[in-house]
């Protein structure tokens, strides 16, 4: 007797969706070849910035996914449970300083932080690491040094960036310290996440987690890069020049610009240094706020973390950066 | 064990990106997007993606069924879309459109030293960088009337005299997103002959005038876009 109640396999439907996506992409390729939009200067500018942001960021997201998969497969949970047992006054600054050993920009630290939290590290410590790593890593501090070399604000900029970056990252960790892993991280329903249990082979599990993390983060990166490229194309940098000498407003304007431009933390100091009309506080606001909160990161954070965490993070990063840079401006400006 | 559509689709995404990175290496187009300081990320990305793809291809089969939701399909297609765009569009570099929207190299704290300016061939960045240093400007003044040769594109700003243009080039630190414009005024150009964004090689005599430097043109030649269109810091 045939069991007619048995559900039909869903794969044919899945294959049709994959084929439809492929056909849509092929149609877009033909359209772009026939109606070359780069004849329009704004469109050409958009595609160049969009492409360059992705070409630079994708390898770092990939590296982040490699580290994340390695943590999942090769590092036992007990390691993170032991770290979580450390007293919090030690845990958060320690996590922030660990960022010094992870020399990638902000896109790579997001999948690593997610994985650290899912493996048992205190979620607050994981996000502190995520926010601090793009600022405290040696490559970023050296590039800041080079950008400000020969100027009298060289050391205030380098040390101010490192110090304030550390303070802001720890502040966010402290604010979200009472949130559990489930409250902080958006659950992800991907069959690849269970492959370890299914097959047991470590290499298979490693590559499955790697591809899963890469494709998960990648789509948010693409969306963020598109918005950032549109902002760079349609919002001229000179638009904020008029508020350069207005206290507080100049700090907020530079933070807003950093958010819109979505620059890599390894190069943003060169752009910040070009805003000579702005004071030290405003330039620091650009350099501390940008690597923690920008357009492309917003998409990555929203895909990875809960709305509650995102709201807490953006409010804390904004408030502490503003207060810290205002204090530095008063002290040294 | 059957082929998983989800795993095949993620393999296609990784193959697309790996293919793009190998294409950038083979075609030499990396320099249109990244500086020479950061272009190592492309071969690194190509190799790591290829290894990751090989690992993924080794586990395409699964015991159960793995559905691909419409949202999954859109997300995966969104990841391939940039690859399609970058491969389908003709190669290009930043133009005068971007010059009007970006900060200038001069404001970015790049300063040429008086020693660099005093001797040897003068580059576009030497001259632009001298504008922020009194010593460098004095050294440049000592070389007034000397012959210089620069390559850049024509940027004619509104209200400029018909025989003048701003020779422009971009300097990038990591990628095109952080580009800063490097500019020098050129006088004595044949009116109406040079179109906006035309790449040219200018030969002329250099004259520092107060806080500005002008090249008095002796010859201008139309050239194609250099293989490295951007200067690197």
Image (spheres, helix red, strand yellow):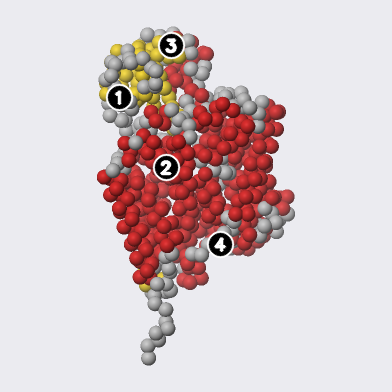
Mark-to-mark CA distance, 3 and 4: 63 Å
Q: Which mark lies nearer to you, 3 or 4? A: 4
Q: Which disc number belongs to residue A187?
A: 4
The residue wearing badge 3 is B208
Which residue is painted at 46% across and 49% down in the image?
A223
Q: Chain of mark 3?
A: B
Q: Which mark lies nearer to you, 2 or 1? A: 1
Between B146 and A182, the one nearer to me in the picture: A182
Left or right: B89 in relation to B98: left
**Label 4 Cα neighbours within 10 Å, binned few <14 / some 14-19 / many ≥20:** few
Which residue is painted at 36% across and 49% down in the image?
B83
The residue wearing badge 1 is B195
Q: Which mark lies nearer to you, 3 or 2? A: 2
Q: Chain of mark 1?
A: B
**Label 2 Cα neighbours within 10 Å, binned few <14 / some 14-19 / many ≥20:** many
Name the element at disc 4.
loop
Q: Quadrant of residue B205?
A: top left
Mark-to-mark CA distance, 1 and 4: 55 Å
Which residue is painted at 69% across and 37% down in the image?
A323
Q: Position of residue A279 (x, y in %)?
A: 62, 27
Picture layout, residue A205 above or below residue A299: below
Mark-to-mark CA distance, 3 and 2: 38 Å
Q: Quadrant of residue A34?
A: top left
Picture layout, residue B12 above or below residue B62: above
**Label 3 Cα neighbours within 10 Å, binned few <14 / some 14-19 / many ≥20:** some
Residue furthest bottom as drawn? A1
Q: Which disc number belongs to residue A50?
A: 2
Q: Position of residue A271 (x, y in %)?
A: 51, 32
Residue A8 in view, yes or no: yes
């Amino acid at each position: 007797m045939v069991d007619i109640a048995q559900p039909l396999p869903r794969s044919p439907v899945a294959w049709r969706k994959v084929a439809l996506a492929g056909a849509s992409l092929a149609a877009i390729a033909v359209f772009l070849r026939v109606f070359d939009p780069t004849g329009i200067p704004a469109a050409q500018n958009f595609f160049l910035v969009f492409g360059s942001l992705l070409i630079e960021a994708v390898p770092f997201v990939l590296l982040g996914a490699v580290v994340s998969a390695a943590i999942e497969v090769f590092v036992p949970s007990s390691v993170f449970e032991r770290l979580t047992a450390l007293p919090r006054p030690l845990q958060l600054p320690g996590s922030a300083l660990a960022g010094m050993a992870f020399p990638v920009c902000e896109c790579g630290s997001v999948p690593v932080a997610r994985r650290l939290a899912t493996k048992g590290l205190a979620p607050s410590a994981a996000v502190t690491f995520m926010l601090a790593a793009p600022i405290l890593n040696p490559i970023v501090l050296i590039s800041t040094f080079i950008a400000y070399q020969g100027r009298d604000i060289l050391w205030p900029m380098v040390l101010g960036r490192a110090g304030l970056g550390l303070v802001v990252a720890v502040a966010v960790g402290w604010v979200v310290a009472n949130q559990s892993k489930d409250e902080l991280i958006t659950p992800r329903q991907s069959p690849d996440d269970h492959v370890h249990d299914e097959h047991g082979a470590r290499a298979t599990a490693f590559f499955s987690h790697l591809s899963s993390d890469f494709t998960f983060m990648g789509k948010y990166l693409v969306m963020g890069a598109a918005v950032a490229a549109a902002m760079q194309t349609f919002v001229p940098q000179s638009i904020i020049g008029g508020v350069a000498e207005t206290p507080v407003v100049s700090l907020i304007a530079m933070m807003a610009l950093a958010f819109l431009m979505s620059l890599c933390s390894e190069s943003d100091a060169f752009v910040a240094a070009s805003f000579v009309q702005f004071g030290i506080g405003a330039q620091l606001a650009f350099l501390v706020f940008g690597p923690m909160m920008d357009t492309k990161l917003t998409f990555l954070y929203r895909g990875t973390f809960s709305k509650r965490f995102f709201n807490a993070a953006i409010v804390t990063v904004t408030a502490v950066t503003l207060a810290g840079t205002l204090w530095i401006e008063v002290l040294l400006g | 064990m059957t082929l998983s559509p989800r795993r095949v689709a993620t393999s296609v995404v990784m193959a697309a990106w790996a293919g793009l990175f190998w294409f950038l290496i083979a075609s030499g187009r990396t320099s249109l997007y990244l500086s020479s300081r950061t272009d190592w990320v492309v071969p690194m990305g190509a190799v790591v993606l290829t290894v990751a793809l090989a690992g993924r291809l080794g586990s395409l089969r699964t015991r159960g069924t793995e559905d691909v939701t419409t949202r999954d399909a859109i997300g995966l297609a969104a990841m391939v879309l940039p690859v399609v765009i970058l491969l389908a569009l003709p190669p290009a570099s930043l133009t005068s459109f971007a010059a009007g929207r970006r900060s200038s190299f001069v404001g970015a704290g790049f300063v040429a030293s008086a020693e660099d300016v005093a001797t040897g061939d003068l580059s576009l960045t030497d001259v632009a960088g001298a504008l922020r240093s009194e010593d460098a400007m004095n050294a440049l003044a000592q070389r007034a009337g000397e012959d210089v040769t620069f390559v850049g594109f024509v940027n004619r700003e509104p209200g400029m005299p018909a025989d003048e243009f701003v020779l422009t080039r971009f300097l990038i630190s990591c990628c095109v997103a952080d580009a800063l414009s490097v500019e020098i005024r050129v006088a004595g150009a044949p009116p109406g002959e040079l179109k906006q964004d035309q790449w040219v090689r200018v030969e002329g005599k250099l004259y520092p005038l107060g806080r500005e430097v002008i090249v008095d043109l002796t010859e201008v030649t139309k050239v194609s876009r250099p293989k490295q269109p951007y200067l690197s810091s």
